[in-house]
Image: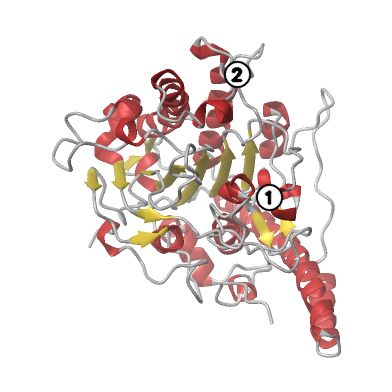
């Protein structure tokens, strides 16, 4: 029987109807709002990805002591917020045997799952629920969107290394072991999705009427049916129920927002805003094909989604391993071709420039978060943002020391402004720890995890 990683997800919504359950109210800060106290903002988590690894001596600080004063070239754009940054060298990736001939099919697909695909069902998506979707299952009932998935390019790369499904090359989010979550590449569509706008001018999107009693009947009947089904059909039914529960979470969100509106009308302050909070940022859709402007507007959309509490979970696939080039940097060579540099200075220099470019876009996003007031601090104070790659070195396809950058204090749960040069752990450990810091309960570690990385936690 498939585990959902969570303490019964329905328990998070049980009793959410005409009046919201007290535990849910406490989570949202409702109780504080009703009592007239300051509201503690929620924690959000985000993930941003770049393929093919990095040039290690351009990425890692020389020493833990020099980190804040003399960051390496790749991290220079993060200098203003280094006190909100955490680096951990020594995080290993998932060993890919028996898929040794599929490094690029597995660098993204294992990044948030920390698990290999099913070796006996290579041509089908069958891996594991990803960390972002585990978080969305817990946090998603409290926002209008359970999660936000963004990408810079279409997820259409076609290749079959080791006979693996082509979806593994360009997806990092998995709603269930067999359901990859598509990412949106059009900024205007993202803006419409965030705020329920129609693509047609002058017409707003409408929410279909939802019937909680009907959902309860469907779930109750499915539970009875499940007992009579063989195991494979039970998995299919579980996936169907995941979809039903997603609708259930949206109902809870709608009811929550109706409650909020009623309280505001009665003169009670909204639980999601403090008087000192910064106003919502403005989104400007870029014209043209300049990659940096495109990526920055996607980052702005991520910031706005968090700032307005439209969602608390996001992923952004900055690029995928399918021939991407960066003409803004003065050359048209593809990223992948330059990663096989064999230590040639010219090619290695181009990889370093591409790495810096991608980190610069991440820095753009987290610096904007750091500039926005929220509660007693900033938006970044209440976020956990992870940038990284699924390979250590694209030249050798190594995975023993994956590059990760953690930004934000996670509501006070993470001790930032540090570089750990000798971390002992794997990417499953890191993902498990990030979700723990965000307050997401787990019934087991993620993927290959065996522990939490307690050194990153604020005691």
* Callout count: 2
Query: Circle 1: is it few (<14), some (14-19), or many (20+) Cα within 10 Å?
Result: many
- Image coords of residue 279 (percent x, y): 47, 30
Which mark identifies residue 282?
none
Query: Observer-nearest residue: 449 or 380?
Result: 449
Mark closest to the chain's N terminus, 1 or 2: 1
Q: Is residue 281 visible?
A: yes
Q: How far is mark 1 from mark 2, CA to CA? A: 32 Å
Which mark identifies residue 284?
2
Residue farthest toward the left in the current orientation of the protein = 65
Q: Residue at label 1?
A: 168
Identify the residue shown where x is 75% and y is 33%: 197
- Image coords of residue 339 (percent x, y): 50, 31
Q: Give the side of residue 377 with respect to residue 105, left or right.
A: left
Task: For the N terminus, give its image quadrant.
Answer: bottom right
Instruction: Name the secondary structure under disc 1.
Output: helix
Identify the residue shown where x is 54% and y is 19%: 292
Query: Observer-nearest residue: 249 or 236?
Result: 236
Q: Give the side of residue 317 with respect to residue 450, left or right.
A: right
Instruction: Name the secondary structure under disc 2.
Output: loop
Task: For the C terminus, give its image quadrant.
Answer: bottom left
Query: Circle 2: is it few (<14), some (14-19), or many (20+) Cα within 10 Å?
Result: few
Where 448 falls versus 385 (above or below)?
Answer: below
């Amino acid at each position: 029987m498939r585990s959902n990683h969570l303490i019964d997800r329905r328990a998070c919504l049980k009793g959410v109807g005409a009046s919201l359950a007290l535990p849910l109210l406490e989570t949202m800060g409702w109780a504080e709002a009703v009592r007239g106290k300051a509201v503690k903002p929620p924690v959000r988590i985000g993930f941003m990805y770049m393929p093919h690894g990095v040039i290690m001596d351009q990425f890692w600080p020389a020493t833990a002591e020099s980190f804040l004063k003399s960051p390496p070239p790749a991290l220079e754009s993060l200098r203003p917020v280094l006190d909100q940054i955490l680096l951990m060298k020594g995080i290993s990736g998932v060993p890919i045997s028996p898929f040794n001939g599929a490094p690029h099919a597995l660098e993204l697909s294992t990044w948030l799952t920390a698990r290999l695909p099913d070796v006996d069902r290579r041509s089908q998506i069958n891996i594991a629920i990803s960390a972002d979707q585990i978080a969305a299952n817990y946090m998603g009932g409290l926002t209008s969107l359970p999660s936000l998935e963004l990408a810079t390019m279409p997820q259409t790369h076609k290749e079959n290394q080791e006979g693996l499904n082509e979806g593994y090359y360009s997806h990092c989010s998995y709603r269930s072991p067999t359901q990859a979550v598509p990412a949106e590449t059009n900024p205007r569509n993202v803006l419409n999705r965030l705020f329920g706008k129609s693509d047609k001018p002058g017409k707003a999107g409408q929410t279909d009427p939802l019937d909680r009693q009907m959902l309860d009947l469907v779930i109750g009947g499915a539970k009875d049916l499940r007992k009579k089904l063989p195991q494979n059909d039970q998995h299919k039914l579980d996936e169907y129920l995941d979809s039903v529960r997603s609708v259930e979470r949206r109902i809870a969100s709608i009811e929550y927002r109706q409650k909020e509106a009623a309280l505001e009308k009665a003169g009670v302050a909204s639980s999601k805003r403090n008087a000192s909070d910064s106003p919502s940022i403005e989104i400007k859709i870029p014209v043209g094909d300049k990659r940096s402007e495109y990526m920055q507007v996607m980052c702005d959309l991520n910031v706005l989604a968090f700032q307005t509490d439209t969602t608390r979970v996001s992923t952004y696939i900055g690029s995928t391993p399918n021939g991407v080039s960066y003409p803004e940097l003065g050359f048209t060579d593809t990223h992948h071709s330059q990663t096989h540099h064999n230590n040639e200075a010219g090619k290695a220099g181009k990889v370093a420039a591409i790495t810096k470019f991608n980190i610069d876009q991440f820095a753009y996003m987290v610096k904007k978060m750091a500039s926005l007031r929220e509660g007693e601090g900033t938006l970044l104070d209440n976020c956990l943002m992870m940038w990284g790659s699924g390979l250590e070195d694209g030249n050798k396809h190594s995975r023993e020391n994956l590059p990760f950058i953690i930004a934000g204090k996670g509501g006070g749960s993470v001790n930032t402004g540090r570089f750990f040069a000798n971390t002992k752990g794997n990417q499953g450990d890191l993902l498990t720890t990030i979700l723990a810091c965000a307050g997401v309960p787990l019934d087991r570690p993620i993927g290959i995890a065996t522990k939490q990385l307690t050194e990153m936690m604020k005691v």
